Image (spheres, helix red, strand yellow):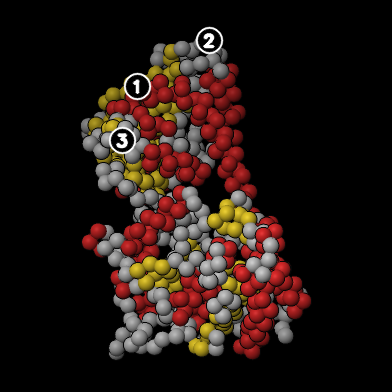
Amino acid sequence: MSTYYNDNTGADELRGFLDTAVALAKEVGPAFKDGFWRKGQFASADDFAAEGKQGNIADCVTAVDCHIEKVLFSRLREIYPHHKFVGEETTAECGQVSITNDPTWIVDPVDGTNNFVHHFHFTGVSISLAINKEPVVGVIYLPILDELYTGVRGQGSFLNGQRLPLFNPPTLTTPTSLSQCMLVSEHGSSHDETLQSRMRSLTRLLLAKEHGGAGLESLRFAGAATSDMSLVAKGIAEIHWEIGLHAWDIAAASVIVTESGGAVFDGAGWWGLDMAEGEREPRPLNIWNRSIVSVRYIPDLPGQPGSGRELQRQLAKELLTHVEDIPCTPDGTQMIKNTLWSVYDWLFSTMWIIESTRNDDKVDIYRKMIWPEISGNVLELGPGFAASLKFLAHETTNDGSFYVDPNVIKSYTALEPNPFMYGRLQGNAEANGFNVSYDRLSYPSDKVHNTVSPKPNMVPFKIVRGTLDDAADIPKAVLAQAPYDSILTSFSLCTVRDPETALRNIQSLLKPGGTFYFIEHVRQPDPKDMTVVDDNGVDAVFWGKVQDWITPIWKLIGHGCHVNRRSGLTVAKIGGWKVVDYKSVRPTIDLQSRIMPLSFGKAVKADN
């Protein structure tokens, strides 16, 4: 047997890997059945030992899971000592998995553990071998149903020795839209806001086309990805969609589906994203990215060779158009990087929460003065956690909650430089009656949460990531909504370069007569600036130098969201306004107010 593997690994060698996987799946079958029926070594509750993973009983693990994985990996290491191994339970325990191009066995000892716990028959063992990160061998064994699925790249897939799919035309039909399809999916193990996203997507798929849905014929939950995808491979279900699962859930099944003539694609949905029609094409499946669409074998239309493959792509495209993406940390070494980044995310966000909460009382005084005037087509710069939204013009609903008045605010675009603000920004926007979407071109896919308004009168709110460093840097999504009636900012000009350039860009985005509203941390006011009030005898020269020392550090850690400025005088300096009205204040004499006093006011763009 060779010690170096590539895409040309021989058919006989792959068949040898399959034989090993089949033998091991059958070897652990008796223990699996004992655990399912609570017999033998798993007869007592203590022996069975079901518990939630990280406190989530909907995603549970049993002693059977751990026992079977240990047996499988022990046998595989004896046979293939130089191979790598990825298993659900060991990965769940250590929190990371290293992925290389080396032959890697990917194991789920009990797929559908919740089914297993509740004696629901759709549960089994999944074993796959990946080479160059791509699965090439797949075995799914459902011991309670006595179903053994096997697949090898280029050699077809089988159920108990019978080639898949189980049906032939005309029994196996040629669907041309989701209205002719049965979908298998899952609601997921997380019972939080991600569940709401899944349910919205499934509802949208089921809704009739005249009501804005896909008109899906039917929906089924089997409770396990391997069982779902086996239904696709057999030709029973036309399509499968799921998001949030892991490589061990789909590696073996993806081989079995594709070798049955089916197709697999990335399952990250497009609903709510700004995408050109040319971008709306299903992407190839990457088993490590935690989302999937699989489509069964579809016979060609009469006289149209290749039409079956095209229909698979079209069905996947139709489904992805109606479902939302749910950001998930990819499996693999990227998990380590993301964990470290998440720690920084948490530290930065926690600091921001503390500072924002501490400053809200003194800043809200000025928001209350000028924010209620904001109207029309609105752009907010650096909204952070969007605390400012509660001071816009609102209407009261029948249930007593507040929503932004759609007769006053027509649309709202938020330009946020900081990638860590998106979650709380979205939540605050929704709480204030906005229907939130993200600009796909500027936000990374793993940072995008999309929602669909349950209330038809909610104002559209688009979140865009970017800066106003120069005209060429202005995101397309911001330009697409221009010109704006109102532009506002609390503490951010979305630049770390030149405030004057940012202000000129702001002015260019306003319509004639439009208004720029600002509350800013600023450089020390000019001692001759008579608009400075409540100065409290602060030494402007000394604290101005302190700002000069702090600014480079803030540029490094602030993600481009702040720059210390020279008061509202900078706004007036650039010209082009018919009204500039502002004041610079130090609301308190604490350290932060000494370093960063406030400037607040508005500037109205000239009519021509």
Q: Between tags 2 and 3, which lies in front?
A: 3
Question: The N terminus is located in which quarter?
Answer: bottom right
Nearer-N-terminus badge (1/2): 1
Q: CA distance from mark 2 to mark 3?
A: 49 Å
The answer to which of marks 1 and 3 sits earlier in the sequence is: 1
Circle 1 — which element? helix
In the rendering, which numbered label is found on residue 399? 3
Above or below residue 275? Residue 25 is below
Residue 537's disc is: 2
Residue at 43% x, 15% y: name it: 532
Q: Residue at x 55, y 86 (%)?
A: 160
Q: Nearer the viewer, mark 1 or mark 2?
A: 1
Specify the amino acid type for callout 3.
Asp
Question: Under tag 2, what secondary structure?
Answer: loop
- Please give the name of the residue rendered at 40% of the width and 20% of the height, measured from the top-left corner: 365
Instruction: Say which residue appears at 41% left-offset and 12% top-offset.
Output: 530
User: Does the residue at mark 1 contact the one at mark 2 (Cβ under 8 Å)?
Assistant: no
Q: Is residue 91 visible?
A: no
Q: Left or right: 371 with respect to 73? A: left
Q: Can you say which quadrant of the picture contains the C terminus?
A: top left
Q: Residues within 10 Å of mark 1 (few under 14, many from 20)?
A: few
The x, y position of residue 244, in whole percent, is 51, 59
Rendered location of residue 278, percent (x, y): 34, 65
Q: Are marks 1 and 3 in contact (CB under 8 Å)?
A: no
Along the line of sight, the residue nearer the viewer: 54 or 441: 54
Horizontal and vertical percent position of residue 80: 74, 77
Closest to the observer, 595 or 259: 259
Please give the label number shown on residue 369.
1
